[in-house]
Image (cartoon, rainbow, N blue to C red):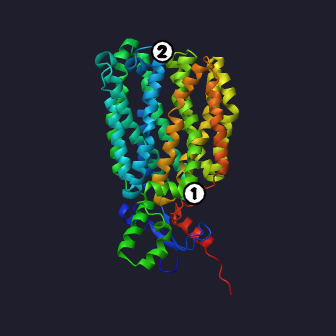
Amino acid sequence: MSNGSTPTHLAPDQDRDALKRHRVLFRAVARRKNPKLRRTDITVTDERVVKRAVKAAALGNAMEWFDFGIYSYLAVTIGKVFFPGGSDTTSLLSSFATFAVAFLVRPLGGAYFGPLGDRIGRKKVLALTMIMMALGTFCIGLIPSYATIGFWSPVLLIAFRLVQGFSTGGEYGGASTFIAEYAPDKKRGFFGSFLEMGTLIGYTGAAGIVLLLNTTVDSDAMLAWGWRLPFLIAGPLGLVGLYLRIKLDETPAFQKLEAAHTHGAAGSVVETEAEFSHLSENAPKKKLSEIFAQQWPTLILCIALVGAYNITDYMLLSYMPTYLTDTLHYEESHGLLILLGTMIVLMCVISSVGRLNDRYGRKPLLMAGMLGFFLLAVPSFLLVKQGSLAAVCAGMALLGLSLVCLLGTMSAALPALFPTSVRYGSLSIGYNLAVSLFGGTTPLVITALMDVFDENVMVPAYYTMGAALVGVIAVACMKETAQQPLEGSPPSVATPEEAVELITAQTPEPRF
């Protein structure tokens, strides 16, 4: 390549430092990709580094949701340990109310950790959220029961749930931003799908441990000490996740943003404005009021998408075991076993969904998932209600296939809604507001509605349909972002050859 460019072919065994020196290889005209950009660098990613980043983010996410999943699958037992007074329904409602409490502080966590991640970096904040989540979960396993210390037992449970919720407020926005900013543009859906695979791994691990305890420990021992074991496991797992995260470099997009501001402080103002105007327009020290003022239309869209997505997600992955056990009177182990099988199937196909949304777009896959829930919720719950193993599995499969279209796509679609300089903060605020209002309250709302409507077992289906209808409207309003650079970031490609092709496609033909 001419014009004195750095050599385009990197040796497979180059070390990380050499790769950093060669990350930015090209200058190119990019008006077609983003009319606001006059010139931009093309980032050539290293697949090994991307895979390490994805692994650390996904495994950390798995450990976060392992902690949250434990509480969901032990909801009935926790209700008896911490809220023993009243009927079984009252204890279950109290348990789910405590589950929902953690979601009330998630917007506060998002409002704190999100802008902090835009200011000091994604990596540091993700390490901090991991420490807090593991600590909160571990401490829940140490709380004495209501029979031992009375009123202070549920108070301590709520306190540590608040710690969990506050830390989780910075998790999804940071992890999805982390992967999106590392991945090349044409593979962002594929790599992003591994974040939700981490979610499924966390839920599966939690369900597997609870299932093992239910089948090997009798009910009295489970109430006395068995329920504590999954919570105590969170401590060592948290240390593993912390180690994985602190070993990573900061994302290329954030490094570029930092370089822009460093350059702006020490270099030519004119040069900086010409080179980095797309970055300096939205500085990472934006106040929350400015994020709401400038990003509010996209925040509303994000809340609608995430609200619909999370109601369907929590309905299937968190509430369904309780529905099968408490409402349809299945054996607790049978309900967990069916859910385990469903989640394993989802893990097997979720990366394929990521590839599909890279190829065909985010909107078609998201629309397929939302329409699937809207059209198939009633048939699915009728199958589950029928009671036979084959019918229950068929109903769960219909719901699971609809959900996997959302799981495999959202982690790539949501970060692309916001510009780089405020991505972590804006996504964390929008995501956690939606989860707080709609996702975390799903088990509580469904349980309460079923109590109001005389145990009508179709209530979850109708609630899911309402959420899916909102999701259909939101997907119709969003822009397609597949195979496009993140807003405020340069194009990112997987190989030098792909960069050359991009330059060739974007450079106008000379005219004589």
Element under disc 1: helix
* Residue 111 % position (x, y): 43, 48
Q: Nearer the viewer, residue 326 or 203?
A: 326
Which residue is label 1 attached to?
A: 186
Q: How many marks?
A: 2
Measure the C-alpha gap from mark 1 to mark 2.
51 Å
Residue for point 48% across, 74% down = 275
* Residue 254 % position (x, y): 42, 60
Amino acid type of the residue tagged 1 in the rendering: Lys
Residue for point 65% across, 49% down = 363
Reading the chain from its start, which is encountered first: label 1 or label 2?
A: 2
* Residue 362 relative to residue 226: left or right: right
Which residue is label 2 attached to?
A: 88
Element under disc 2: helix
- Depth check, mark 1 against mark 2: the one in front is 2
Mark 1 packing: few (<14 Cα in 10 Å), some, or many (20+)?
many
